[in-house]
Amino acid sequence: MRKTIIVFIVMVLAFLPVYNVMAISEGQSNLIKNKCDSIQEDLKQLQVDDSRVRVYLGALYERVLTKYIVPLNVRLVENSISDVDFIENQNNFVAAKIAFVDDFVNYQRSLEELTLIDCKKNTESFYQKLTVVREKRAIMAKDVAKLSGLMTKQKSLVLSLMENL
């Protein structure tokens, strides 16, 4: 139950609007101070979990690119079936994969900095950094969604190609 409450508190704080980042209410500040140790534990666990997900997704994206997208495009060119959509999708996938890696590194650095802030003594700084971490995590989520969309597009391109052959 305690962990559920703490996760709820972190999520509520993470999803508050960013309009006035400089000021948090006294109630929010006291809540952070009172639950600081548990919040820090949860953030460290989040670091571990996110690292695992990044490794899994990074490997998946690399495998999709090197075992499916690039070999197919090479084969199409070798067989004089060049299709601009396949090349464009490959280029977009490579760019999105690079962005994912870069954005994840930025997110992890910010999350690491957040875990180093003493939320009992520096509640305001902790809250501001939490807002930054939340924004960087949202960027990563967009990267994942974009890569997923590009994989879906690749599948539809392949299905279309199969129909036309």
Image (tube, helix red, strand yellow):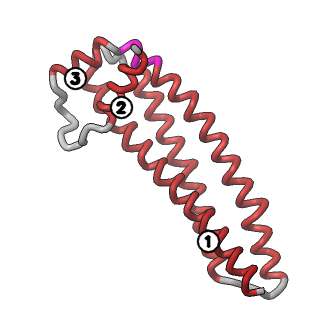
Secondary structure beneath label 2: helix
The residue at the point 58 percent across, 48 percent down is 101
- Residue receiving disc 2: 11
Q: Give the amino acid type for the residue marked by disc 1 in the picture.
A: Asn
In the image: residue 113, left or right of residue 14: right
Query: Mark 3 or mark 2, which is nearer the start of the sequence?
Result: 2
The answer to whether residue 111 is seen in the rendering is yes
Q: Which residues are magenta?
A: 36-41
Q: Earlier in the sequence, mark 1 or mark 3?
A: 3
Residue 39 image point, x, y percent: 39, 19
Residue 89: image tag: 1
Left or right of 128: which side holds 135? Answer: right
Q: Which residue is mark 3?
A: 28
- Marks 2/3 in contact by CB < 8 Å: the verdict is no
Task: Identify whether 66 is placed above or below 115.
Answer: below
Label 2, label 3: how many angstroms apart (C-alpha)? 13 Å
Secondary structure, mark 1, is: helix
Residue at the image position 43 percent from the left and 17 percent from the top: 3
The majority secondary structure of the magenta stretch comes to helix
Which three-letter amino acid code belongs to the residue tagged 3? Gln
Comparing 158 with 98, the one in front is: 158
Tag 2 and tag 1, C-beta contact below 8 Å: no
Residue 31 position, x and y percent, is 26, 17
Indicate whether 130 appears above or below 163: above
